[in-house]
Image (spheres, rainbow, N blue to C red):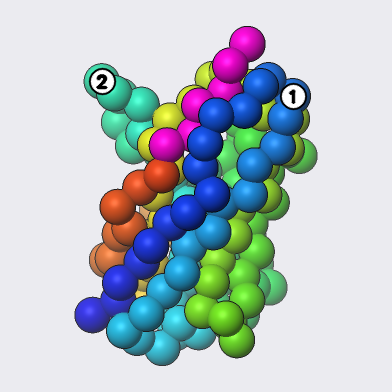
Amino acid sequence: QVQLVESGGGLVQAGGSLRLSCAASGGTFSSYAMGWFRQVPGKEREIVAAISLSGGSTYYADSVKGRFTISRDNAKNTVYLQMNSLKPEDTAVYYCAATKYAGTARLRVVPYDYWGQGTQVTVSS
């Protein structure tokens, strides 16, 4: 059983930056691909970015390409989401998630098995 705890959310002005962290425990972190998702009330949760076991492959939603960067430190059991040039439409609760998927091509669509509790990101205009 993997436990995930997000941190780093907050209030930022448009154009600003935030770095989200997700610390994992209770499992072998390097055995899990990781993803960041976000959800706005009344809308479906959407995947923002994902990263493979080793960190060699990544996926980004079109809406964040060029602005967000996902990375992982397997020695620290942590995955990060660096968010730059933030826009009001990035406002959401951000969740990290883990999957045992060992490939690279389907990071966007595979089921994620473990989820954190979420962290609020609010971007003011």
Task: Check disc 1 and give the amino acid type.
Answer: Gly
Q: Which residue is mark 2?
A: 42
Q: Is residue 69 magenta?
A: no
Residue at screen point 55% across, 29% down: 11
Front in this rendered view, residue 98 or 84: 84
The image position of residue 25, as x and y in percent, is 37, 80
- The type of residue carrying mark 2 is Gly
Q: Nearer the viewer, residue 39 or 105?
A: 39
Which region of the structure is painted magenta?
Answer: 120-125
Mark 2 near mark 1, Cβ–Cβ under 8 Å?
no
Check the picture and name the quadrant holding the C terminus.
Answer: top right
Q: Which image quadrant for residue 89?
A: top right
Res. 90 visible in picture: no
The 10 Å Cα crowd at callout 2, few under 14, some 14 to 19, many 20 or more, is few
Q: Position of residue 87 (x, y in %)?
A: 64, 22
Across and down, in percent, residue 63 comes to 61, 30
